[in-house]
Image: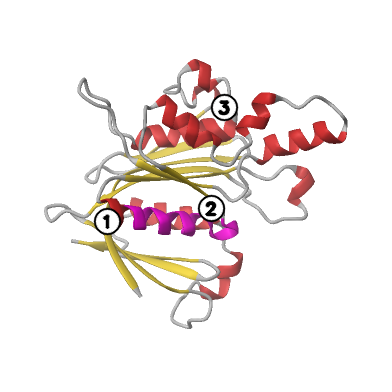
């Protein structure tokens, strides 16, 4: 078992269920989570117009959450964290559009082609916010969120500097929805992880095998648990301070998150 300690100082969750979208924010360790409705037209206003025009809902939702966990720029410097970006399917709508253009012998859209790359959004974000630190892009099926969390914690421990975890997935297009299980709720999530300090409370993350342990309450359903489920488990835990522990259980690995003084 691996035990790591880190601070999760701020986070943001965007959800879209049947066109009813909302944004939940916790912008400080001593602030309560706040939820309010959103509309697509107002997302990603912090992205410069030339780049914002390149983003569809996938990128704009991710940008909205990422913006909320970056520290405000000052006259001396801008925030410069590492970024771990994870998504099970990536910008699948652009990919399907490109495949349709190929199948019908239409000209491919250069914008759709460039923005369909898995790490395209985080590249735009790096340019927009002048982030020069490294970014990592991950796709790991239903375990995409868990894999992203693992990479984030490892980078925090290795660099002893802030790392932002950003996850986004939208419902699959109809052509895939019946063949491949996917998220039914459009989701974007970002969280800022920082090294644990002695004067501030943090979280303890313990890693252990998943799928075969009778002690793991989630192991029986781990194979069918989606990245969206992992996001909801984590954000519900963070929003309710009376909860002391939550387990995010994937196909092979699980993280148990507990409050650490």
Looking at the image, residue 206 lies above or below residue 84: below
Classed neighbour count for the residue bearing mark 1: other residues with Cα under 10 Å, few (<14), some (14–19), many (≥20): many
Q: Quadrant of residue 240?
A: bottom left
Distance, label 2 to label 3, CA atoms, is: 22 Å
Q: Position of residue 199 (x, y in %)?
A: 11, 53
Residue 55 is tagged as: 3
Query: Which stretch appears magenta?
Result: 140-155
Q: Evaluate if marks 3 and 1 touch, with contact meaning CB atoms under 8 Å apart.
A: no
User: Is 146 one of the magenta-colored residues?
Assistant: yes
Q: Which of marks 3 and 1 is nearer the N terminus?
A: 1
Mark toward the viewer: 2 or 1? 1
Please tell me which residue is depicted at 69% across the width and 45% down the height of the picture: 172
Between discs 2 and 3, the one toward the N terminus: 3
Q: Residues within 10 Å of mark 2 (few under 14, many from 20)?
A: many
Check disc 3 and report its element: helix, strand or loop: loop
Give the mark nearest the N terminus, 2 or 1.
1
Q: For numbered disc 1, what is the local secondary structure? A: strand
Q: Mark 2 points at which residue?
A: 228
How far apart marks 3 and 1 lie (CA) works out to: 32 Å
Give the residue number, with chain letter if any, for mark 1.
6
Tell me: residue 229, above or below residue 63: below
Please provide percent x and percent y for residue 149. 42, 56
When asked about the image quadrant of residue 117, the answer is top right
84 with respect to 58 (left or right):
left
């Amino acid at each position: 078992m691996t035990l790591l300690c880190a601070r999760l100082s701020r986070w943001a969750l965007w959800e879209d269920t049947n066109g009813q979208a909302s944004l939940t924010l916790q912008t400080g360790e001593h602030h309560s989570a706040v939820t309010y409705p959103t509309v697509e037209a107002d997302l990603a206003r912090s992205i410069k117009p030339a780049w914002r025009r390149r983003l569809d809902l996938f990128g704009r939702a991710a940008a909205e959450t990422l913006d909320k966990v970056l520290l405000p720029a000052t006259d001396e410097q801008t925030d410069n964290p590492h970024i771990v970006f994870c998504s099970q399917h990536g910008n699948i709508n652009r990919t399907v559009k490109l495949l349709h253009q190929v199948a019908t012998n239409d000209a491919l859209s250069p914008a759709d082609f460039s923005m369909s790359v898995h790490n395209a959004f985080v590249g735009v974000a790096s340019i927009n916010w002048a982030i020069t630190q490294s970014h990592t892009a991950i796709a790991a099926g239903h375990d995409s969120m868990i894999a992203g969390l693992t990479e984030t914690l490892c980078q925090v421990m290795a660099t002893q500097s802030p790392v932002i975890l950003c996850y986004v997935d939208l419902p699959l297009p109809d052509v895939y929805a019946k063949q491949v299980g996917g998220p039914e709720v459009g989701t974007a999530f970002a969280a800022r992880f920082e090294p644990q300090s002695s004067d501030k409370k943090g979280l303890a993350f313990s890693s252990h095998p998943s799928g075969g342990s009778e002690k793991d309450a989630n192991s029986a359903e781990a194979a069918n648990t989606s990245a969206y489920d992992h996001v909801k488990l984590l954000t519900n835990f963070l929003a309710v301070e009376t909860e002391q522990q939550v387990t995010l259980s994937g196909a092979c690995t699980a993280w148990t998150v507990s409050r650490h003084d």
